[in-house]
Image (tube, coloured by chain):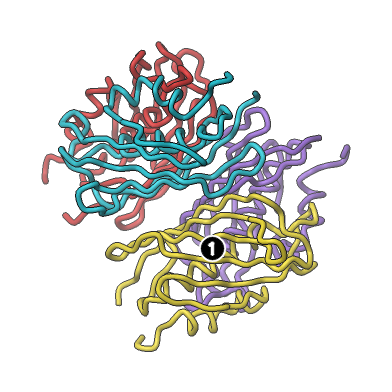
Chain colours: A purple, B yellow, C cyan, D red
Amino acid sequence: MSEHSAESMIGADRAAAMLGIELLGAGDGTARTIMTVRPDMVNGLDLCHGGLVATLADTAFAAACNSRSRVTVAAGFDVTFLRPGKVGDRLLAEAREVVLQGRSGVYDVVVTREKDGSMVAVFRGRSRATGA
Amino acid sequence: MSEHSAESMIGADRAAAMLGIELLGAGDGTARTIMTVRPDMVNGLDLCHGGLVATLADTAFAAACNSRSRVTVAAGFDVTFLRPGKVGDRLLAEAREVVLQGRSGVYDVVVTREKDGSMVAVFRGRSRATGA
Amino acid sequence: MSEHSAESMIGADRAAAMLGIELLGAGDGTARTIMTVRPDMVNGLDLCHGGLVATLADTAFAAACNSRSRVTVAAGFDVTFLRPGKVGDRLLAEAREVVLQGRSGVYDVVVTREKDGSMVAVFRGRSRATGA
Amino acid sequence: MSEHSAESMIGADRAAAMLGIELLGAGDGTARTIMTVRPDMVNGLDLCHGGLVATLADTAFAAACNSRSRVTVAAGFDVTFLRPGKVGDRLLAEAREVVLQGRSGVYDVVVTREKDGSMVAVFRGRSRATGA
Protein backbone atom coordinates (compact mmCIF):
# COMPACT_ATOMS: atom_id res chain seq x y z
CA MET A 1 0.00 0.00 0.00
CA SER A 2 2.56 2.49 -1.20
CA GLU A 3 0.30 5.51 -0.93
CA HIS A 4 -0.96 4.85 2.55
CA SER A 5 -1.23 8.07 4.53
CA ALA A 6 -3.28 9.60 7.31
CA GLU A 7 -4.94 11.85 4.74
CA SER A 8 -5.98 9.01 2.42
CA MET A 9 -7.22 6.98 5.37
CA ILE A 10 -9.34 9.74 6.91
CA GLY A 11 -10.43 10.88 3.43
CA ALA A 12 -11.99 7.44 2.90
CA ASP A 13 -13.56 7.39 6.39
CA ARG A 14 -17.30 7.56 5.79
CA ALA A 15 -18.16 7.59 9.51
CA ALA A 16 -15.97 10.66 10.03
CA ALA A 17 -17.65 12.33 7.02
CA MET A 18 -21.12 11.48 8.36
CA LEU A 19 -20.25 13.18 11.66
CA GLY A 20 -18.62 16.20 10.00
CA ILE A 21 -15.22 15.36 11.47
CA GLU A 22 -12.44 17.19 9.61
CA LEU A 23 -8.76 16.36 9.61
CA LEU A 24 -6.83 19.58 10.22
CA GLY A 25 -3.41 18.00 9.81
CA ALA A 26 -1.30 14.93 10.50
CA GLY A 27 2.35 14.00 10.52
CA ASP A 28 5.16 12.44 12.57
CA GLY A 29 2.83 10.64 14.93
CA THR A 30 0.53 13.62 15.53
CA ALA A 31 -2.86 14.67 14.16
CA ARG A 32 -5.66 17.15 14.80
CA THR A 33 -9.37 16.71 14.06
CA ILE A 34 -12.36 18.95 14.69
CA MET A 35 -16.12 18.42 14.93
CA THR A 36 -19.07 20.71 15.59
CA VAL A 37 -21.68 19.30 17.97
CA ARG A 38 -24.91 19.11 15.98
CA PRO A 39 -28.43 18.81 17.44
CA ASP A 40 -28.49 15.16 16.33
CA MET A 41 -25.34 14.36 18.33
CA VAL A 42 -26.65 14.86 21.85
CA ASN A 43 -27.76 12.28 24.40
CA GLY A 44 -30.84 12.27 26.63
CA LEU A 45 -29.31 14.96 28.85
CA ASP A 46 -28.82 17.31 25.85
CA LEU A 47 -25.04 16.90 26.02
CA CYS A 48 -22.76 15.63 23.27
CA HIS A 49 -22.92 11.82 23.39
CA GLY A 50 -19.73 10.55 25.05
CA GLY A 51 -19.37 7.95 22.33
CA LEU A 52 -19.14 10.71 19.72
CA VAL A 53 -16.54 12.63 21.72
CA ALA A 54 -14.63 9.34 21.75
CA THR A 55 -15.20 8.92 17.99
CA LEU A 56 -13.68 12.35 17.36
CA ALA A 57 -10.66 11.45 19.50
CA ASP A 58 -10.42 7.99 17.93
CA THR A 59 -10.27 9.59 14.48
CA ALA A 60 -7.39 11.85 15.53
CA PHE A 61 -5.70 8.77 17.02
CA ALA A 62 -6.19 6.82 13.76
CA ALA A 63 -4.72 9.69 11.75
CA ALA A 64 -1.74 9.99 14.10
CA CYS A 65 -0.87 6.32 14.12
CA ASN A 66 -1.30 6.04 10.34
CA SER A 67 0.87 9.10 9.72
CA ARG A 68 3.95 6.86 9.55
CA SER A 69 2.95 5.12 6.30
CA ARG A 70 2.12 1.80 7.88
CA VAL A 71 -1.42 0.45 8.17
CA THR A 72 -2.28 0.55 11.85
CA VAL A 73 -5.44 -0.23 13.75
CA ALA A 74 -6.76 0.55 17.21
CA ALA A 75 -6.37 -2.30 19.69
CA GLY A 76 -8.36 -0.29 22.22
CA PHE A 77 -8.57 2.98 24.08
CA ASP A 78 -9.46 4.57 27.41
CA VAL A 79 -11.30 7.88 27.70
CA THR A 80 -12.07 10.09 30.71
CA PHE A 81 -14.76 12.74 30.39
CA LEU A 82 -14.11 16.07 32.07
CA ARG A 83 -16.73 18.54 30.84
CA PRO A 84 -19.66 18.01 28.47
CA GLY A 85 -19.88 19.37 24.94
CA LYS A 86 -23.02 21.29 23.96
CA VAL A 87 -24.80 21.91 20.67
CA GLY A 88 -22.80 24.36 18.60
CA ASP A 89 -19.50 23.71 20.40
CA ARG A 90 -16.57 23.09 18.13
CA LEU A 91 -14.50 20.31 19.67
CA LEU A 92 -10.84 19.98 18.80
CA ALA A 93 -8.92 16.71 19.24
CA GLU A 94 -5.11 16.78 19.29
CA ALA A 95 -3.26 13.45 19.17
CA ARG A 96 0.40 12.76 19.83
CA GLU A 97 2.47 9.61 19.95
CA VAL A 98 3.65 8.64 23.44
CA VAL A 99 5.60 5.61 22.28
CA LEU A 100 5.88 3.42 19.20
CA GLN A 101 7.77 0.20 19.72
CA GLY A 102 7.76 -2.52 17.11
CA ARG A 103 4.17 -2.95 16.06
CA SER A 104 2.63 -1.47 19.21
CA GLY A 105 2.05 2.16 20.02
CA VAL A 106 0.41 4.39 22.61
CA TYR A 107 -1.15 7.72 21.61
CA ASP A 108 -2.64 10.46 23.76
CA VAL A 109 -5.48 12.66 22.59
CA VAL A 110 -6.78 15.75 24.36
CA VAL A 111 -10.22 17.07 23.37
CA THR A 112 -10.86 20.73 24.07
CA ARG A 113 -13.62 23.23 23.35
CA GLU A 114 -12.21 25.48 20.65
CA LYS A 115 -13.68 28.73 21.95
CA ASP A 116 -12.02 28.71 25.35
CA GLY A 117 -9.57 25.82 25.31
CA SER A 118 -11.29 24.07 28.23
CA MET A 119 -10.70 20.32 28.39
CA VAL A 120 -13.59 18.09 27.41
CA ALA A 121 -11.89 14.69 27.55
CA VAL A 122 -8.57 12.92 27.69
CA PHE A 123 -8.10 9.75 25.64
CA ARG A 124 -5.30 7.19 25.41
CA GLY A 125 -5.23 4.84 22.43
CA ARG A 126 -3.37 1.55 22.00
CA SER A 127 -2.40 0.80 18.39
CA ARG A 128 -1.13 -2.20 16.50
CA ALA A 129 0.39 -2.19 13.02
CA THR A 130 -1.01 -4.88 10.75
CA GLY A 131 0.88 -7.34 8.58
CA ALA A 132 2.21 -5.40 5.64
CA MET B 1 -36.81 14.07 37.86
CA SER B 2 -39.39 11.68 39.19
CA GLU B 3 -39.88 9.79 35.96
CA HIS B 4 -36.24 9.22 35.20
CA SER B 5 -35.70 5.84 33.57
CA ALA B 6 -33.37 4.16 31.14
CA GLU B 7 -36.17 4.15 28.59
CA SER B 8 -36.90 7.89 28.87
CA MET B 9 -33.20 8.67 28.76
CA ILE B 10 -32.45 6.60 25.66
CA GLY B 11 -35.75 7.65 24.08
CA ALA B 12 -34.53 11.26 24.22
CA ASP B 13 -31.05 10.37 22.93
CA ARG B 14 -30.83 11.94 19.49
CA ALA B 15 -27.33 10.59 18.80
CA ALA B 16 -28.55 7.04 19.39
CA ALA B 17 -31.50 7.70 17.07
CA MET B 18 -29.20 9.14 14.38
CA LEU B 19 -27.12 5.96 14.50
CA GLY B 20 -30.14 3.65 14.55
CA ILE B 21 -29.26 2.33 18.00
CA GLU B 22 -32.25 0.59 19.59
CA LEU B 23 -32.74 -0.18 23.28
CA LEU B 24 -33.88 -3.79 23.56
CA GLY B 25 -34.41 -3.68 27.31
CA ALA B 26 -33.05 -2.33 30.60
CA GLY B 27 -33.49 -3.03 34.27
CA ASP B 28 -31.66 -3.78 37.53
CA GLY B 29 -28.33 -2.49 36.31
CA THR B 30 -28.45 -4.25 32.96
CA ALA B 31 -29.35 -3.16 29.42
CA ARG B 32 -29.11 -4.34 25.82
CA THR B 33 -28.77 -2.21 22.70
CA ILE B 34 -28.43 -3.14 19.02
CA MET B 35 -27.16 -1.34 15.91
CA THR B 36 -26.82 -2.33 12.25
CA VAL B 37 -23.55 -1.24 10.63
CA ARG B 38 -24.54 1.07 7.77
CA PRO B 39 -22.34 2.03 4.80
CA ASP B 40 -21.89 5.49 6.35
CA MET B 41 -20.49 3.99 9.57
CA VAL B 42 -17.24 2.53 8.27
CA ASN B 43 -13.73 3.91 8.50
CA GLY B 44 -11.05 4.12 5.81
CA LEU B 45 -10.44 0.35 6.04
CA ASP B 46 -14.16 -0.39 5.34
CA LEU B 47 -14.69 -1.61 8.90
CA CYS B 48 -17.16 -0.24 11.43
CA HIS B 49 -15.52 2.83 13.00
CA GLY B 50 -14.25 1.85 16.46
CA GLY B 51 -15.74 5.03 17.89
CA LEU B 52 -19.20 3.89 16.78
CA VAL B 53 -18.73 0.43 18.30
CA ALA B 54 -17.84 2.31 21.48
CA THR B 55 -20.91 4.55 21.06
CA LEU B 56 -23.16 1.49 20.86
CA ALA B 57 -21.57 0.08 24.02
CA ASP B 58 -21.67 3.46 25.76
CA THR B 59 -25.41 3.68 25.07
CA ALA B 60 -25.99 0.26 26.67
CA PHE B 61 -23.83 1.40 29.61
CA ALA B 62 -25.87 4.64 29.95
CA ALA B 63 -29.11 2.65 29.93
CA ALA B 64 -27.80 0.19 32.51
CA CYS B 65 -26.54 2.80 34.94
CA ASN B 66 -29.70 4.88 34.58
CA SER B 67 -31.94 1.85 35.13
CA ARG B 68 -31.89 2.52 38.87
CA SER B 69 -33.89 5.78 38.69
CA ARG B 70 -31.00 8.07 39.48
CA VAL B 71 -29.42 10.39 36.92
CA THR B 72 -26.00 8.98 36.21
CA VAL B 73 -23.28 10.00 33.78
CA ALA B 74 -20.21 8.34 32.34
CA ALA B 75 -16.96 9.35 34.02
CA GLY B 76 -15.05 7.37 31.41
CA PHE B 77 -14.62 4.00 29.81
CA ASP B 78 -12.08 1.58 28.39
CA VAL B 79 -12.70 -0.49 25.26
CA THR B 80 -10.71 -3.32 23.66
CA PHE B 81 -11.43 -4.24 20.05
CA LEU B 82 -11.37 -7.93 19.20
CA ARG B 83 -12.86 -8.33 15.73
CA PRO B 84 -14.12 -5.71 13.27
CA GLY B 85 -17.76 -5.13 12.38
CA LYS B 86 -18.69 -5.00 8.68
CA VAL B 87 -21.46 -3.33 6.73
CA GLY B 88 -24.73 -5.15 7.37
CA ASP B 89 -23.60 -6.73 10.65
CA ARG B 90 -26.04 -6.36 13.51
CA LEU B 91 -24.02 -5.62 16.63
CA LEU B 92 -25.50 -6.40 20.03
CA ALA B 93 -24.25 -4.72 23.22
CA GLU B 94 -25.07 -6.27 26.58
CA ALA B 95 -24.30 -4.28 29.73
CA ARG B 96 -24.24 -5.44 33.34
CA GLU B 97 -23.35 -3.79 36.60
CA VAL B 98 -20.13 -5.03 38.16
CA VAL B 99 -20.41 -2.86 41.24
CA LEU B 100 -22.37 0.18 42.40
CA GLN B 101 -21.04 1.81 45.54
CA GLY B 102 -22.30 5.16 46.68
CA ARG B 103 -22.28 7.38 43.64
CA SER B 104 -19.71 5.39 41.69
CA GLY B 105 -20.28 2.33 39.56
CA VAL B 106 -18.49 0.02 37.15
CA TYR B 107 -20.34 -1.60 34.25
CA ASP B 108 -19.15 -4.18 31.73
CA VAL B 109 -20.44 -4.32 28.19
CA VAL B 110 -19.77 -7.08 25.69
CA VAL B 111 -20.42 -6.35 22.00
CA THR B 112 -21.08 -9.36 19.78
CA ARG B 113 -22.08 -9.95 16.19
CA GLU B 114 -25.68 -11.10 16.38
CA LYS B 115 -25.46 -13.72 13.63
CA ASP B 116 -22.78 -15.89 15.22
CA GLY B 117 -22.24 -14.50 18.71
CA SER B 118 -18.56 -13.74 18.03
CA MET B 119 -17.09 -11.03 20.25
CA VAL B 120 -16.45 -7.67 18.63
CA ALA B 121 -15.38 -5.66 21.68
CA VAL B 122 -15.29 -5.60 25.45
CA PHE B 123 -15.99 -2.32 27.23
CA ARG B 124 -15.80 -1.26 30.87
CA GLY B 125 -17.57 1.95 31.92
CA ARG B 126 -17.08 4.06 35.04
CA SER B 127 -20.22 5.90 36.16
CA ARG B 128 -21.00 8.66 38.60
CA ALA B 129 -24.46 9.62 39.87
CA THR B 130 -25.13 13.36 39.75
CA GLY B 131 -26.51 15.58 42.50
CA ALA B 132 -30.20 14.75 42.79
CA MET C 1 9.32 -24.89 28.03
CA SER C 2 7.44 -28.16 27.86
CA GLU C 3 6.27 -28.11 31.45
CA HIS C 4 4.99 -24.58 31.45
CA SER C 5 2.06 -24.18 33.83
CA ALA C 6 0.49 -21.57 36.04
CA GLU C 7 1.81 -23.43 39.08
CA SER C 8 5.40 -23.55 37.86
CA MET C 9 5.24 -19.90 36.85
CA ILE C 10 3.85 -18.62 40.14
CA GLY C 11 6.06 -21.06 42.06
CA ALA C 12 9.09 -19.32 40.56
CA ASP C 13 7.69 -15.83 41.20
CA ARG C 14 9.94 -14.31 43.85
CA ALA C 15 7.97 -11.06 44.05
CA ALA C 16 4.81 -13.01 44.87
CA ALA C 17 6.73 -14.97 47.52
CA MET C 18 8.15 -11.76 49.02
CA LEU C 19 4.61 -10.40 49.37
CA GLY C 20 3.19 -13.65 50.74
CA ILE C 21 0.88 -14.10 47.75
CA GLU C 22 -0.36 -17.70 47.50
CA LEU C 23 -1.85 -19.38 44.45
CA LEU C 24 -5.01 -21.19 45.55
CA GLY C 25 -5.67 -22.77 42.19
CA ALA C 26 -5.55 -22.25 38.43
CA GLY C 27 -6.98 -23.89 35.35
CA ASP C 28 -8.93 -23.28 32.14
CA GLY C 29 -8.27 -19.57 32.08
CA THR C 30 -9.08 -18.99 35.74
CA ALA C 31 -6.99 -18.56 38.88
CA ARG C 32 -7.28 -17.49 42.50
CA THR C 33 -4.63 -15.84 44.66
CA ILE C 34 -4.69 -14.59 48.25
CA MET C 35 -2.58 -12.15 50.29
CA THR C 36 -2.71 -10.89 53.87
CA VAL C 37 -2.12 -7.16 54.27
CA ARG C 38 0.98 -6.82 56.45
CA PRO C 39 2.05 -3.69 58.35
CA ASP C 40 4.79 -3.13 55.77
CA MET C 41 2.26 -3.04 52.92
CA VAL C 42 0.38 0.13 53.78
CA ASN C 43 0.73 3.60 52.31
CA GLY C 44 0.89 6.96 54.08
CA LEU C 45 -2.85 6.79 54.88
CA ASP C 46 -2.42 3.40 56.61
CA LEU C 47 -4.29 1.61 53.84
CA CYS C 48 -2.99 -1.23 51.69
CA HIS C 49 -0.92 0.38 48.91
CA GLY C 50 -2.98 0.36 45.72
CA GLY C 51 0.02 -0.92 43.80
CA LEU C 52 0.09 -4.02 45.99
CA VAL C 53 -3.62 -4.66 45.53
CA ALA C 54 -2.86 -4.44 41.81
CA THR C 55 0.12 -6.80 42.25
CA LEU C 56 -2.11 -9.39 43.90
CA ALA C 57 -4.62 -9.10 41.04
CA ASP C 58 -1.84 -9.10 38.43
CA THR C 59 -0.53 -12.36 39.89
CA ALA C 60 -3.97 -14.00 39.58
CA PHE C 61 -4.14 -12.66 36.01
CA ALA C 62 -0.69 -14.10 35.21
CA ALA C 63 -1.71 -17.49 36.60
CA ALA C 64 -4.98 -17.47 34.66
CA CYS C 65 -3.45 -16.55 31.32
CA ASN C 66 -0.60 -19.05 31.78
CA SER C 67 -3.00 -21.84 32.72
CA ARG C 68 -3.28 -22.80 29.04
CA SER C 69 0.32 -24.05 28.71
CA ARG C 70 1.54 -21.16 26.61
CA VAL C 71 3.93 -18.51 27.88
CA THR C 72 1.91 -15.34 28.15
CA VAL C 73 2.76 -11.88 29.44
CA ALA C 74 0.76 -8.86 30.54
CA ALA C 75 0.49 -6.14 27.90
CA GLY C 76 -1.21 -3.92 30.45
CA PHE C 77 -4.11 -3.61 32.84
CA ASP C 78 -6.67 -1.24 34.27
CA VAL C 79 -7.71 -1.24 37.93
CA THR C 80 -10.46 0.61 39.79
CA PHE C 81 -10.27 0.85 43.57
CA LEU C 82 -13.54 0.50 45.47
CA ARG C 83 -12.70 0.09 49.14
CA PRO C 84 -9.34 0.10 50.92
CA GLY C 85 -7.67 -2.94 52.43
CA LYS C 86 -6.40 -2.68 56.01
CA VAL C 87 -3.67 -4.40 57.99
CA GLY C 88 -4.71 -7.96 58.72
CA ASP C 89 -7.26 -8.17 55.91
CA ARG C 90 -6.98 -11.24 53.74
CA LEU C 91 -7.55 -10.17 50.16
CA LEU C 92 -8.72 -12.71 47.60
CA ALA C 93 -8.25 -12.20 43.85
CA GLU C 94 -10.30 -14.28 41.42
CA ALA C 95 -9.38 -14.13 37.73
CA ARG C 96 -11.36 -15.37 34.75
CA GLU C 97 -10.80 -15.22 31.03
CA VAL C 98 -13.18 -12.89 29.18
CA VAL C 99 -11.80 -13.69 25.75
CA LEU C 100 -8.75 -15.33 24.23
CA GLN C 101 -8.32 -14.76 20.53
CA GLY C 102 -5.13 -15.71 18.78
CA ARG C 103 -2.32 -14.37 20.91
CA SER C 104 -4.38 -11.71 22.68
CA GLY C 105 -6.59 -12.16 25.70
CA VAL C 106 -8.63 -10.16 28.18
CA TYR C 107 -8.97 -11.30 31.81
CA ASP C 108 -11.08 -9.89 34.61
CA VAL C 109 -10.02 -10.05 38.23
CA VAL C 110 -12.18 -9.16 41.22
CA VAL C 111 -10.44 -8.53 44.55
CA THR C 112 -12.56 -9.02 47.67
CA ARG C 113 -12.00 -8.99 51.41
CA GLU C 114 -12.21 -12.61 52.44
CA LYS C 115 -14.05 -12.06 55.71
CA ASP C 116 -17.14 -10.40 54.25
CA GLY C 117 -16.82 -10.70 50.48
CA SER C 118 -16.89 -6.92 50.01
CA MET C 119 -15.25 -5.71 46.79
CA VAL C 120 -11.87 -4.03 47.12
CA ALA C 121 -11.00 -3.59 43.44
CA VAL C 122 -11.87 -4.63 39.93
CA PHE C 123 -9.07 -5.24 37.45
CA ARG C 124 -8.98 -5.98 33.73
CA GLY C 125 -5.78 -7.38 32.22
CA ARG C 126 -4.70 -7.49 28.59
CA SER C 127 -2.44 -10.44 27.75
CA ARG C 128 -0.23 -11.42 24.86
CA ALA C 129 1.25 -14.86 24.23
CA THR C 130 4.94 -14.81 23.36
CA GLY C 131 6.72 -16.54 20.51
CA ALA C 132 6.88 -20.20 21.40
CA MET D 1 -4.53 18.84 57.78
CA SER D 2 -2.31 21.87 57.51
CA GLU D 3 0.93 19.98 57.09
CA HIS D 4 -0.21 17.59 54.44
CA SER D 5 2.42 17.26 51.73
CA ALA D 6 3.68 14.76 49.21
CA GLU D 7 6.84 14.38 51.28
CA SER D 8 5.00 13.60 54.53
CA MET D 9 2.71 11.20 52.72
CA ILE D 10 5.45 9.23 50.98
CA GLY D 11 7.63 9.46 54.10
CA ALA D 12 4.94 7.54 56.00
CA ASP D 13 4.44 5.01 53.19
CA ARG D 14 5.71 1.71 54.56
CA ALA D 15 5.06 -0.21 51.35
CA ALA D 16 7.25 2.22 49.42
CA ALA D 17 9.96 1.85 52.09
CA MET D 18 9.73 -1.96 51.93
CA LEU D 19 10.30 -1.81 48.18
CA GLY D 20 13.11 0.72 48.40
CA ILE D 21 11.11 3.35 46.49
CA GLU D 22 12.58 6.82 46.99
CA LEU D 23 10.86 10.13 46.35
CA LEU D 24 13.24 12.32 44.35
CA GLY D 25 10.99 15.37 44.39
CA ALA D 26 7.40 16.59 44.18
CA GLY D 27 5.62 19.86 43.56
CA ASP D 28 2.95 21.58 41.48
CA GLY D 29 1.29 18.36 40.40
CA THR D 30 4.51 16.57 39.50
CA ALA D 31 6.68 13.99 41.25
CA ARG D 32 9.56 11.62 40.61
CA THR D 33 10.26 8.29 42.28
CA ILE D 34 12.98 5.69 41.74
CA MET D 35 13.39 1.98 42.59
CA THR D 36 16.12 -0.58 41.98
CA VAL D 37 14.87 -3.98 40.84
CA ARG D 38 16.01 -6.46 43.50
CA PRO D 39 16.26 -10.24 43.09
CA ASP D 40 13.12 -10.61 45.23
CA MET D 41 11.09 -8.39 42.86
CA VAL D 42 11.04 -10.60 39.77
CA ASN D 43 8.28 -12.85 38.48
CA GLY D 44 8.52 -16.40 37.16
CA LEU D 45 10.12 -15.17 33.93
CA ASP D 46 12.91 -13.39 35.87
CA LEU D 47 11.56 -9.97 34.94
CA CYS D 48 10.45 -7.24 37.32
CA HIS D 49 6.88 -8.09 38.39
CA GLY D 50 4.48 -5.83 36.49
CA GLY D 51 2.61 -5.13 39.69
CA LEU D 52 5.77 -3.65 41.21
CA VAL D 53 6.42 -1.47 38.16
CA ALA D 54 2.84 -0.27 38.67
CA THR D 55 3.50 0.25 42.40
CA LEU D 56 6.49 2.46 41.60
CA ALA D 57 4.36 4.50 39.17
CA ASP D 58 1.44 4.59 41.60
CA THR D 59 3.73 6.03 44.27
CA ALA D 60 4.85 8.83 41.93
CA PHE D 61 1.18 9.43 41.08
CA ALA D 62 0.27 9.59 44.80
CA ALA D 63 3.07 12.09 45.43
CA ALA D 64 2.03 14.23 42.46
CA CYS D 65 -1.64 14.40 43.35
CA ASN D 66 -0.87 15.08 47.02
CA SER D 67 1.59 17.83 46.14
CA ARG D 68 -1.25 20.38 46.22
CA SER D 69 -1.85 20.12 49.98
CA ARG D 70 -5.13 18.28 49.72
CA VAL D 71 -5.57 14.63 50.71
CA THR D 72 -6.14 12.75 47.48
CA VAL D 73 -6.53 9.06 46.74
CA ALA D 74 -6.30 6.93 43.63
CA ALA D 75 -9.65 6.04 42.10
CA GLY D 76 -7.87 3.78 39.64
CA PHE D 77 -5.22 3.59 36.97
CA ASP D 78 -4.30 2.04 33.65
CA VAL D 79 -0.81 0.81 32.81
CA THR D 80 0.74 -0.43 29.56
CA PHE D 81 3.99 -2.40 29.71
CA LEU D 82 6.54 -1.70 27.00
CA ARG D 83 9.80 -3.34 28.01
CA PRO D 84 10.63 -5.47 31.05
CA GLY D 85 12.81 -4.37 33.95
CA LYS D 86 15.64 -6.67 35.04
CA VAL D 87 17.46 -7.26 38.30
CA GLY D 88 19.76 -4.32 38.99
CA ASP D 89 17.88 -1.88 36.75
CA ARG D 90 17.10 1.44 38.32
CA LEU D 91 13.59 2.42 37.25
CA LEU D 92 12.57 6.06 37.28
CA ALA D 93 8.90 7.14 37.39
CA GLU D 94 8.00 10.70 36.43
CA ALA D 95 4.45 11.89 37.10
CA ARG D 96 2.71 15.00 35.82
CA GLU D 97 -0.81 16.35 36.15
CA VAL D 98 -2.84 16.23 32.95
CA VAL D 99 -5.89 17.89 34.45
CA LEU D 100 -7.29 18.69 37.89
CA GLN D 101 -10.90 19.71 37.91
CA GLY D 102 -12.82 20.02 41.15
CA ARG D 103 -12.05 16.90 43.11
CA SER D 104 -11.04 14.77 40.13
CA GLY D 105 -7.69 14.62 38.42
CA VAL D 106 -5.81 12.70 35.76
CA TYR D 107 -2.05 12.13 36.06
CA ASP D 108 0.37 10.56 33.61
CA VAL D 109 3.44 8.65 34.70
CA VAL D 110 6.23 7.43 32.45
CA VAL D 111 8.58 4.75 33.79
CA THR D 112 12.02 4.57 32.20
CA ARG D 113 15.23 2.65 32.76
CA GLU D 114 17.62 5.18 34.25
CA LYS D 115 20.73 3.99 32.41
CA ASP D 116 19.46 4.52 28.88
CA GLY D 117 16.12 6.32 29.22
CA SER D 118 14.25 3.52 27.45
CA MET D 119 10.54 3.35 28.29
CA VAL D 120 9.42 0.54 30.56
CA ALA D 121 5.77 1.49 31.06
CA VAL D 122 3.22 4.26 30.66
CA PHE D 123 0.64 4.75 33.39
CA ARG D 124 -2.41 7.00 33.70
CA GLY D 125 -3.93 7.54 37.15
CA ARG D 126 -7.36 8.84 38.10
CA SER D 127 -7.45 10.70 41.41
CA ARG D 128 -10.13 11.93 43.76
CA ALA D 129 -9.66 14.40 46.59
CA THR D 130 -11.28 13.32 49.85
CA GLY D 131 -13.56 15.32 52.12
CA ALA D 132 -11.43 17.88 53.82
Residue D6 seen from this side: yes
Q: Is residue A72 left or right of residue A57?
A: right
In percent of the image, x 27 and y 64: which residue is there?
B102
In percent of the image, x 37 and y 48: which residue is there?
C110
Across and down, in percent, residue A81 comes to 46, 59
In the image, B70 versus C60, the foreground residue is: C60
Quadrant of residue D61 in the image?
Answer: top left
Considering every residue shown, the one lying at the far left of the view is D2
Q: Is residue A46 left or right of residue B85?
A: left
In the image, D1 versus D62, the foreground residue is: D62
Residue D126 seen from this side: no
Q: Is residue C53 left or right of residue A15?
A: left
Across and down, in percent, residue B59 comes to 54, 70
Considering every residue shown, the one lying at the far bottom of the view is B3
- Compared with A122, D33 (above or below) is above
- Compared with D51, A123 (above or below) is below
Q: Secondary structure at mark 1?
A: loop
Across and down, in percent, residue A11 comes to 80, 55
Q: Is residue B4 left or right of residue D4?
A: right
- Compared with D112, A14 (above or below) is below
Across and down, in percent, residue A77 comes to 56, 49
In percent of the image, x 33 and y 36: which residue is there?
C51
In percent of the image, x 60 and y 32: which residue is there?
C129
Residue kind at label 1, given as amino acid type: Lys
Give the chain letter at badge 1.
A
For the C terminus of chain D, the image quarter is bottom left
Q: Residues within 10 Å of mark 1 (few under 14, many from 20)?
A: few
Residue to which mark 1 is pinned? A115
Number of numbered tags placed on the structure image: 1
Quadrant of residue D6 in the image?
Answer: top left
